[in-house]
Image (spheres, rainbow, N blue to C red):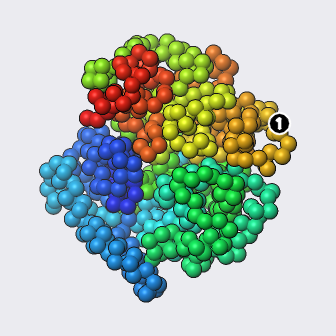
């Protein structure tokens, strides 16, 4: 049995994962420990946690593997600048010192980083490197329940590849077809993220959330789609694309796009981050989302055609586009689809470890066709009751301990039904970008004010942002047109007709905010403008405590679902420790906090009416 440590870092969302004989022991993102969102530094804390969880020291590892090949990336950088020269000289001069320091001397930086964790014998460390898209492919296929499947990876860019189609059989993966830089679906979407005023590499999901506010029937939207397909991207029959580099700067420039050209193209300037969102912004978001969905469907069709497989696995940042995923599912191109829940670069650490385990060491792989290796994505740290009690003493928290978990869920369900917002921290932290019921903020989906309350008073984020429902798996079909499990919140599905409300006349002509606060269903807090919802099915087998809470809520209200959003505020990572959870609770308008079997009421906490005073005393370590 081989023990493999996978690492991703120095670009975006550093992470570490450890596997033992192909079993995933632990995985976590560095940001959760350092509290710096999208921390790209060497994942000292994440690695330390993974080693502790596995009971291993560095010397006891059979291999350490990095998730991509930096020398190939450096080759791509040099060839790209050479191809575009003399354009991009300033960008080249800014990029070179970073690459020379961090990427060319990456082995040394890894060895130095490992020294921060503990002493080790360098001669005993086998350091390997996996190609970027192979890491993505392995994270999806080897974690999936399938012994054989087509593999589709789509993201911004790895070394040269920006998308790939492959096939997985047993313990081997073969990449059949690739799309190469600078032609990239992920970078196309990021360019629109940038132009519409959101941050690249973190705001793409905001763009996806804004798209349903666009008017699909308006001449403006139709014109935008036509412009994108005529001027920016040529979509081939097999889903590959060609991007006109006259309209993009990401290859050699300091910005994603030439703003003046895009202003002339779409008739309005780049939106600044904090400026008002207007209808043309919504229509453009809908337009690029529509184009991305067409590309994904064509690429998946090609994957089915050239692999002959009936099952598909997906990874890469674009695989987090749950709207496109939902459409792909409904098209029935494949019989089954599995999407890696940590589909972005963080998941590359896990994929690299799995690739080395199965492909390098040729370990045997067994599957049952039903159960994946992700354990519900609950792969992060857990905290004991003793650790919670120590935190309570440190911050003088007032709480009630419930030895009987059924009594706890009954009480909390009643509080949720009364309109209260609950912070819910249980068990092992999730790996990946989604909170799946262990580090979540919860509310009553039937409350028409809940979306506004959560966005503006709890999360402190843009008011248009949608929320996801967590629904008992056995009751999902009662609410949504979804005939498959969706445990990782990666599929968007329509809300059933019998739960919908009739829309007023001229609905599509109304402003964003008029649309937002128009009641669309009897679960309005989780029903998006197009009657869709990003569904998480909750399974008793993988998260019994969360299932018990929702079931208790069902028993009291008849409703089998809750609003579920990540336990954090804008600009911060999801909480990790009990202290992180309590800090977030005290700095927001959350009403109740539950950590393990401890329940905290806001009005009972010291200094609860004076957030600044509390944060001054206890807000930092």
Whole-percent x, y for residue 252 in the image? 45, 77
- List the residue tagged with mark 1: 502
Helix, strand or loop at disc 1?
loop
Whole-percent x, y for residue 13 in the image? 40, 53
Q: Which residue is rendered at x = 50% and y = 74% of the image? A: 249
How many numbered badges does the structure rendering display? 1
Height in image: 155 above or below 50?
below
Taking depth in this image into account, of 45 and 419 the one nearest to the observer is 419
Instruction: Rate crowding at label 1 as few (under 14), some (14 to 19) or many (20 or more) other CA atoms within 10 Å.
Output: few
Q: Residue 103's image quarter?
A: bottom left
Observer able to see residue 154: no
Looking at the image, residue 598 lies above or below residue 330: above
Residue 528 is drawn in which quadrant? top right
Residue at 39 percent across and 48 percent down: it is 37
Residue 48 coordinates in the image, percent (x, y): 26, 45
Q: Is residue 577 left or right of residue 468?
A: left
Rendered position, 212 above or below 11: above
Residue for point 76% across, 62% down: 220
Does the image show residue 309?
yes
The x, y position of residue 238, in whole percent, is 66, 71
């Amino acid at each position: 049995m081989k023990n493999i440590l996978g690492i991703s870092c120095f670009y975006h969302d550093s992470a570490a994962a450890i596997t033992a004989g192909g079993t995933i022991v632990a995985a976590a993102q560095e940001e959760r420990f350092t509290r710096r969102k999208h921390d790209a530094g060497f994942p000292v804390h994440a690695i330390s946690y993974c080693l502790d969880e596995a009971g291993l020291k560095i010397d006891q590892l059979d291999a350490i593997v990095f998730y991509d090949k930096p020398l190939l990336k450096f080759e791509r950088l040099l060839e790209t600048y050479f191809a575009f020269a003399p354009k991009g000289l300033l960008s080249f001069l800014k990029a070179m010192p970073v690459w020379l320091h961090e990427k060319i001397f990456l082995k040394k930086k890894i060895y130095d980083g490992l020294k921060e964790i503990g002493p080790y014998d360098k001669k005993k460390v086998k350091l390997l490197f996996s190609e970027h898209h192979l890491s993505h492919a392995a994270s999806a296929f080897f974690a999936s329940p399938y012994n054989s499947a087509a593999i589709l990876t789509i993201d911004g860019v790895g070394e040269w590849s920006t998308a790939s189609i492959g096939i997985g059989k047993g313990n081997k993966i073969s990449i059949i077809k690739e799309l190469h830089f600078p032609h990239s679906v992920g970078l196309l979407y990021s360019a629109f993220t940038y132009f519409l005023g959101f941050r690249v590499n973190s705001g793409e999901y905001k763009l996806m959330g804004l798209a349903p506010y666009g008017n699909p029937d308006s001449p403006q939207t139709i014109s935008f789609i036509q412009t994108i397909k005529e001027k920016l991207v040529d979509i081939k029959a097999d889903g590959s694309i060609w991007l006109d580099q006259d309209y993009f700067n990401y290859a050699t420039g300091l910005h994603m796009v030439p703003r003046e050209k895009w202003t002339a193209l779409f008739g309005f300037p780049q939106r600044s981050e904090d400026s008002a969102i207007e209808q043309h912004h919504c229509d453009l978001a809908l337009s690029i989302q529509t184009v991305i969905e067409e590309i994904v469907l064509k690429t998946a069709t090609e994957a089915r055609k050239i692999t002959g497989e009936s099952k598909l696995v997906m990874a890469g940042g674009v695989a987090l586009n749950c709207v496109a995923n939902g459409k792909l599912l409904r098209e029935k191109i494949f019989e089954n689809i599995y999407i890696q829940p940590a589909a972005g670069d963080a998941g590359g650490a896990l994929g690299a470890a799995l690739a080395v385990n199965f492909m390098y060491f040729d370990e045997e792989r067994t599957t049952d066709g039903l159960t994946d290796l992700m354990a519900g994505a609950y792969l992060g740290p857990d905290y004991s009751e003793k650790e919670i009690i120590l935190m309570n003493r440190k911050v003088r928290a007032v709480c009630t301990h419930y030895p009987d978990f059924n009594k706890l869920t009954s009480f909390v369900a009643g509080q949720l039904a009364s309109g209260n917002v609950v912070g819910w921290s249980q068990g092992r932290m999730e790996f990946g970008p989604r909170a799946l019921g262990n580090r979540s903020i919860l509310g009553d989906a039937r409350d028409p004010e809940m979306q506004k309350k959560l966005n503006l008073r709890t999360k402190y984020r843009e008011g248009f942002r949608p929320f996801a429902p967590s629904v008992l798996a056995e009751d999902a079909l009662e609410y949504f047109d979804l005939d498959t499990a969706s445990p990782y919140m990666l599929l968007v599905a329509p809300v059933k007709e019998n739960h919908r409300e009739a829309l007023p006349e001229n609905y599509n002509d109304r402003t964003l905010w008029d649309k937002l606060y128009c009641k669309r269903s009897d679960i309005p807090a989780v029903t998006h403008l197009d009657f869709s919802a990003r569904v998480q099915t909750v399974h008793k087998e993988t998260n019994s405590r969360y299932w018990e809470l929702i079931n208790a809520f069902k028993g009291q209200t008849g409703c089998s679902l809750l609003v579920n959003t990540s336990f954090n505020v804008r600009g911060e990572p999801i909480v990790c420790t009990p202290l992180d959870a309590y800090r977030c609770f005290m700095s927001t308008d959350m009403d109740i906090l539950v950590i393990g079997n401890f329940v905290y009421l806001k009005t009972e906490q010291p200094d609860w009416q004076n957030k600044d005073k509390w944060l001054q005393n206890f807000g930092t370590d």
